[in-house]
Image (cartoon, rainbow, N blue to C red):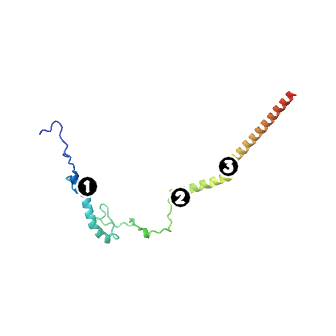
Amino acid sequence: MGRGKFKSKPTGRRQFSTPEDLAAGTSNRPRTFRQKEDEHEKEVESEEVSEEESEEETEQKSKGTQGIIEIENPNLVKPKSLKARDVDTGKTTELSRREREELEKQRAHERYMRLQEQGKTEQAKKDLERLALIRQQRAEAAKKREEEKAAKEQKKLEARK
């Protein structure tokens, strides 16, 4: 039969599993490359696990050409893997410069805020002076208003007489 103007995709036609196939666990769908590769890796790993258990402590996985070429570099630091039971919880770690500076900055800010609350910093002293001046002005204004009120009442009383 002719295909017409449009050609079908190279992947072919879709094949659907029947409910019986799904129930049986078999399917006519081909396995993908990744699934096959994963199965192969699992098989290889299970074989290697028994071999690695004895060699695990002495040898580390090598990347690239490290396994091929033997290098004696005195500056090369080999990463040490610590187990949970070997970790020393009492040991204190040293902070990095940035972390140390950040802590110092926080402590300085807290100390400044404490002094600010106590009124010992220059800014706090200026604020308290300003506040005292404002209170004094408000008290004078209130006193003046009271005097004016009293004067108005006295004028009203005199006007009535």
In the picture of the structure, the residue carrying the numbered disc 2 is 100
Q: For residue 3, which quarter of the picture?
A: top left
Q: Seen in the image, is 113 located left or right of residue 96?
A: right
Residue 34 circle label: 1
For the residues bearing labels 1 and 3, Cβ distance under 8 angstroms? no
Marks 2 and 3, the one that precedes in the sequence? 2
Residue 124 circle label: 3
Residue at the (60%, 53%) spot, across then down: 109
Marks 1 and 3, the one that precedes in the sequence? 1
Frontmost residue, 70 versus 24? 24
Frontmost residue, 110 versus 72? 110
Type of amino acid at the residue the image marks with label 2: Arg
Type of amino acid at the residue the image marks with label 1: Arg
Q: Is residue 141 above or below residue 102?
A: above
Residue 143 place in picture, x, y as percent: 79, 39
Marks 2 and 1, the one that precedes in the sequence? 1
In this rendering, which labeled residue sits more in front, label 1 or label 3?
1
Q: CA distance from mark 1 to mark 3?
A: 70 Å
SS of the residue at dot 3? helix
Q: For residue 48, which quarter of the picture?
A: bottom left
